[in-house]
Image (cartoon, rainbow, N blue to C red):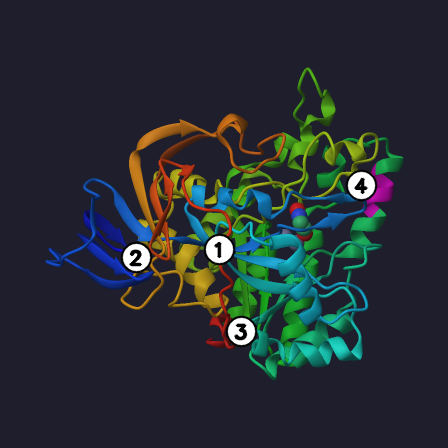
Amino acid sequence: MKSTLIKNGTIVTASDEFVGDVFMKDGKIELVGKNLDVAADEVVDATGKYVMPGGVDQHTHFLFKMDDSRCVGWESSSAAVCGGTTTVVDFVNQEIGKSLKTSVDNYVRDEIGDQACCDYAFHTVVYDPTDELFDEIKHLPEYGITSVKLFMAYKGQAYHMEDGSVLRALQAAKEAGVTIMVHAENAEMIATLQQQTMDAGITGPYGHAVSRPPIVEEEAVRRAAYLAELADAPIYIVHVTAKGAMEVIRDAYSKGVKIFGETCTHYLTVTTDVLKSTSPENGEFEGAKYVCSPALRSQEHLDAMWEAVKKGWLNAISSDHCAFNFEEHKKRGLGDFRKIPNGCAGVENRMQMVWTYGVETGKISKQQFVELCCTNPAKINGIYPQKGTLAPGSDADVLIYDPDSESVISMATSHHKTDYEPFEGRVVKGHPSKVYLRGELVVEDSQYVGKEGTGKFVTSKPYGLAYQK
Ligand code: DUC
Ligand code: ZN
Ligand code: ZN
C-alpha cells in the first residue's frame, strides 16, 4: 500500500495544536511531527487547513423501524465520510427470538453487505429480554461488541424495556466491561400526554414536543442514575437534550455514580420552533421533518447543552442519524403526530455543524471539537487509540478541513439519499477538503471518491471510558 505525507497543516488533536506533518503508510499513521523528512509516494500540501482525526459518530441507525417505516440504510454510508466521519458506531437491533450474535451476523450480511463506505463498530439493542439475552451480554466482548442499548421510552413498541430489564442488563454488563446505554424518556408519561394532546385537538407535528416535555426526559435520566447506582455499574445516557436531565447526570456523577452522556448536533443547533414550521406544499405538516426523540427544545436548553459539552458534563456529540423520508415515512403521521416515525438524517452534517456553531462562535475550542466528535466517542466504545486520534499506530483516518469556505446545506448536494434535509439552508463554515480512511483517499472537496465496500468492522474492547471514572 502506498504512503502519504501530509505537510504543513495545522494538526489538531484533543490535546494539541501545531503546524506540522502526518506520515501514513499501509493504512496506519507512522509519524506525526514538525518538518518530517521522510520519503512518501504522495505529498499533500495542507497549508492553511486543519488536519484532524476522522470523526467517530457513536450514534447512528442505518437500520431502524418504527411501525411500518424503515429508515434509509447503508447505501447512504458515503454521507458519513463526506462529512468527515470515518467511523460510526451503529445500532444493531436484536431480532426477536434470536441471539445478539445472530442478529449482528444477519445485519452484516443483509444490511451492510458490500456497501460500507466508513468503518463501523456496533452497539446492540435489546428487543427480547430473556434469561439467555442477559447471559449473552457477558459474552459480547468475544464478538468485539461492548455496548448495549435499551429503550426506556416507546410504550407499545417491541424495543420498549421495563426498569427490571435495564437493571438486569446493568448487572450482567458490569461482569464483562460492557457499557449499557439508555434512551431515557418516561414511556408512561409520554403515552398519557400523547393521548391528552390528541384529545385537545393538537394532532400535527408540534404535538410531538407537547407530549414529550423536558421533564419526561429528566425523570427517566434520574431513574437511570438510580438503576446504575443500585447495580454499581456505569450507564451512558444517549441524546441528552434537556437542561434538567443534564444536571441530573452532572450531579449524580459528582456524587460518585458512574453516569455519562452525549448530546447530538440538532439538540445544540435547532429549536423546537421548527415543529411549528409551515410550507406551501406541506402546510403545518412541514414540522414532521423535525420529529425525533427526545423532541427538540427551546433555546434555554440548547444553551445548556453547549455549556455541558464545554464543561465536560456531557462528553460526546453524535448525530442520532436515522434517515426517514418525508413522503414515504413521515407522511404516515398526517393527522396523528404519534405515527410520524421518529428520526432525521444528520451523519453528514455533524462535524460541519459543530465546527460552525461551536468552534467558529467560540463556544468550544478546536481541541474540544476533536475530543467531542472523535476522541471521546472512540474511548467510550473501546476503539481508541485505533480510532479517534492522530498518533503513531492509529488507523490512518484523517480529516483535512478547509476552514475558509462557506456553503449552505442542501438536499441537492447531500449524500443522505433522503428526500429532504433537516439542516436545509443552514450556512456552514469550512468543509472536508480530503478524508482518508485507513490511508485511502475517500473524499475530495466533500465528494465521495472512494470505493463502496471498503468500510470494515472495528472490534470494540471492553471497559471503555465509562468504566474509567
Ligand atoms: N429517536 C430518534 O429520533 N430516532 C431513532 C430512535 C430514537 O430514539
Ligand atoms: Zn434513542
Ligand atoms: Zn438513536
Q: Which of marks 2 and 4 is in front?
A: 2
The amino acid on which the numbered mark 1 sits, given as a three-letter code, is Gly
Between the C-alphas of marks 1 and 3, the distance is 41 Å
Q: In this view, does 143 lie above or below 68?
A: below
Crowd class of label 3 (few under 14; some 14 to 19; many from 20; radius 10 Å): few
Q: Which of marks 1 and 3 is in front?
A: 1
> What residue is pinned by disc 4?
338
Closest to the observer, 51 or 104: 104
Q: Do the residues labelled 1 and 2 touch (CB within 8 Å)?
A: no
Instruction: First in sequence, mark 4 or 1: give its number.
Output: 4
The amino acid on which the numbered mark 3 sits, given as a three-letter code, is Lys
Q: In this view, does 166 lie to the left or right of 414?
A: right
Q: In this view, does 159 lie above or below 351?
A: below
Crowd class of label 4 (few under 14; some 14 to 19; many from 20; radius 10 Å): many
SS at circle 4: helix
> What residue is pinned by disc 2?
13
Crowd class of label 2 (few under 14; some 14 to 19; many from 20; radius 10 Å): many
Q: Can residue 293 be seen in this view?
A: no
In the rendered image, residue 408 lying in the magenta stretch gets the answer no
Q: Is residue 368 above or below residue 177?
A: above
Q: Which of marks 1 and 2 is in front?
A: 1
> What residue is pinned by disc 3?
255
The residue at 63%/74% (across/down) is 228
Q: Which of marks 4 and 1 is in front?
A: 1
